[in-house]
Image: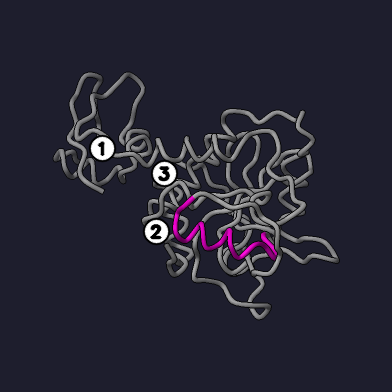
């Protein structure tokens, strides 16, 4: 299903609403490849690995790019600690040319065919996230990082009304690409699907939980939960308390 891209403020709000830990890199909202092709309609989320190590160095690379491939190289860089560094918004150099049959399958939310052509502009059609990893199959993927990939993917799918089938890897889009290497996109789509599944209408508060953490867990803005339960500032909740969860 295609959609107009979210505005930069809505994009930020959408990620935060899913519990994503955000680092805003200066001027990301207007740092893009405007004038080098269209941005949108968007159809899905594409995941990559960076073939780099070191978070600060990786952020610099994906923000600025290379002489042969100017930045930004993604919308967000997902670090090993699970924080997502926003480096650009709009058209960015992340997807390149890929297979039109894959794009049609993403739009229809059906099984992906083999990617055997490079004839369609992916930079206009996908949100792109680079993940800090050497891409050698040995560099580990910490759970915090995998959870962040799950959350950013689910957040954008939820905002656009997409299913988990709208989340793909670069290796499923462009012939010859291998990223992301070290986990399977099928497994990640299963995680995203579980997160997008309908949640119970109530939630019993556990020790250590906050309205914010519960909102991220159930996929509902925490302020909506507070309002549904007549909870006012300072928004205190207690273990054992049963909260009504409003519809999204």
In-front residue for pair 11/180: 180
Above or below 183: residue 163: below
* Stretch of the chain drawn in magenta: 95-110
Q: What's the mark number on residue 160?
A: 2
* Residue holding disc 3: 18
Q: Residue furthest bottom?
A: 35
Q: How is the image coloured?
A: one colour
Above or below 209: residue 75: below
Q: Residues at badges 1 and 2 in contact (C-beta under 8 Å)?
A: no
In-front residue for pair 99/240: 99
- Give residue 36's position: percent from left, percent from top: 68, 78
Q: CA distance from mark 1 to mark 2?
A: 32 Å
Q: CA distance from mark 2 to mark 3?
A: 14 Å
Q: Residues at badges 2 and 3 in contact (C-beta under 8 Å)?
A: no
Does the magenta-highlighted stretch encompass residue 103? yes
Label 2: which secondary element: helix
Reading the chain from its start, which is encountered first: label 1 or label 2?
2
* Residue holding disc 1: 234
Relative to 231, 127 lies left or right: right
Estimate how packed mark 3 is, as few (under 14), some (14 to 19) or many (20 or more) residues with alpha carbons within 10 Å.
Answer: many
**Residue, x 27% and y 45% (percent of image)?**
223
**Residue, x 19% and y 24% (percent of image)?**
241
Estimate how packed mark 1 is, as few (under 14), some (14 to 19) or many (20 or more) residues with alpha carbons within 10 Å.
Answer: few
Relative to 60, 108 lies left or right: left
Q: What's the mark number on residue 47?
A: none
Reading the chain from its start, which is encountered first: label 2 or label 3?
3
């Amino acid at each position: 299903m295609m959609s107009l891209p979210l505005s930069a403020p809505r994009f930020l709000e959408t990620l935060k609403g899913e519990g994503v830990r955000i680092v805003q890199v200066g001027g990301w909202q207007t740092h893009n490849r405007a004038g080098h092709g269209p941005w949108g309609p968007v159809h899905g989320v594409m995941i990559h690995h960076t073939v780099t190590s070191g978070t600060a160095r990786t952020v610099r690379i994906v923000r600025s790019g290379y002489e042969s491939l100017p930045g930004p190289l993604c919308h967000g860089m997902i670090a090993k600690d699970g924080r997502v560094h926003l480096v650009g918004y709009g058209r960015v150099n992340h997807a390149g040319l890929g297979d039109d049959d894959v794009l049609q399958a993403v739009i229809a939310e059906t099984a992906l065919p083999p990617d055997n052509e490079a004839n369609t502009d992916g930079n206009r059609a996908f949100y792109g996230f680079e993940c800090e990893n050497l891409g050698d199959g040995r560099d580990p993927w910490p759970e915090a990082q995998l959870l962040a990939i799950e959350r950013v993917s689910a957040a954008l799918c939820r905002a656009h009304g997409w299913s988990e089938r709208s989340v793909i890897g670069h290796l499923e889009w462009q012939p010859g690409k291998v990223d992301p290497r070290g986990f399977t996109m099928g497994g990640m789509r299963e995680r995203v699907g579980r997160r997008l599944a309908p949640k119970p209408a109530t939630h019993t508060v556990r020790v250590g939980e906050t309205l914010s953490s519960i909102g991220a867990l159930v996929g509902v803005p925490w302020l909506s939960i507070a309002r549904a339960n007549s909870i006012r500032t300072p928004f205190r909740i207690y273990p054992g308390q049963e909260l009504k969860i409003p519809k999204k």
